[in-house]
Amino acid sequence: MAKRVHRPREDAEFNFILGMSEVPVLAYFTGTWPKAIEPCRVMDLVVSGIADDYTGRLTAVRADITRCPAATERYGITGAPSCVLLKEGEAVAHGTGPMTIAEVRTFLDGHL
């Protein structure tokens, strides 16, 4: 995945990225259990494309549920993949399950 999508290794790094972002953050949560792997790979490609399309308008963050358990709990993530749009650290929209790039655009455009 391109460097335009941040990949925090732990909650502290996730929080640092949130604190440094001057634009809304699209956080998408992934999992490594067998049923989550393929849908999360699809979302990797989708979010990478979104990060290109929305350069300067949002920060994209890929958070692994097992590496960022506090963020997972804070934003009510119950499955992977899941997306949360954050403004100043507060969730303004949630999406669960794999989405197409068009679905993510609609998700974002209604809240940016």
Image (cartoon, helix red, strand yellow):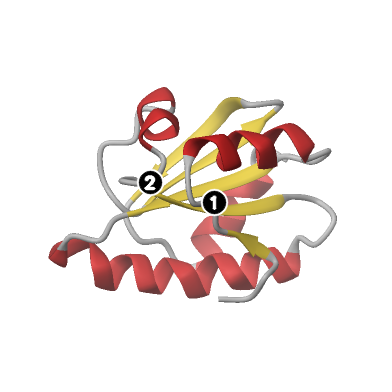
Which amino acid, by three-letter code, is at mark 1? Pro
Q: Residue at x 37, y 73 (%)?
A: 41
x and y, in percent, of residue 59 in the image: 71, 51
Q: Residue at x 83, y 38 (%)?
A: 22
x and y, in percent, of residue 34 in the image: 14, 66
**Mark 2 / mark 1, whichever is N-terminal:** 1
Q: Which numbered disc covers residue 67?
A: 2
Q: Is residue 45 above or below residue 20?
A: below
Q: Residue at x 43, y 66 (%)?
A: 43
x and y, in percent, of residue 69 in the image: 35, 35
Q: Is residue 36 above or below residue 77?
A: below
Q: Residues at badges 2 and 1 in contact (C-beta under 8 Å)?
A: yes
> Considering the numbered disc 1 on the image, is that residue within a helix, a strand or a loop?
loop
Q: Is residue 49 left or right of residue 78?
A: right
Reading the image, the residue beneath label 1 is: 8
Q: Is residue 21 above or below residue 53?
A: above
x and y, in percent, of residue 10 in the image: 47, 43
Q: Residue at x 43, y 28 (%)?
A: 75
Q: Which numbered disc covers residue 105?
A: none
Which amino acid, by three-letter code, is at mark 2? Arg
| Near-viewer residue (13 or 45) | 13
Circle 2 Cα neighbour tier, 10 Å, few/some/many (<14 / 14–19 / ≥20): some
> Considering the numbered disc 2 on the image, is that residue within a helix, a strand or a loop?
loop
Q: Is residue 99 left or right of residue 54?
A: left
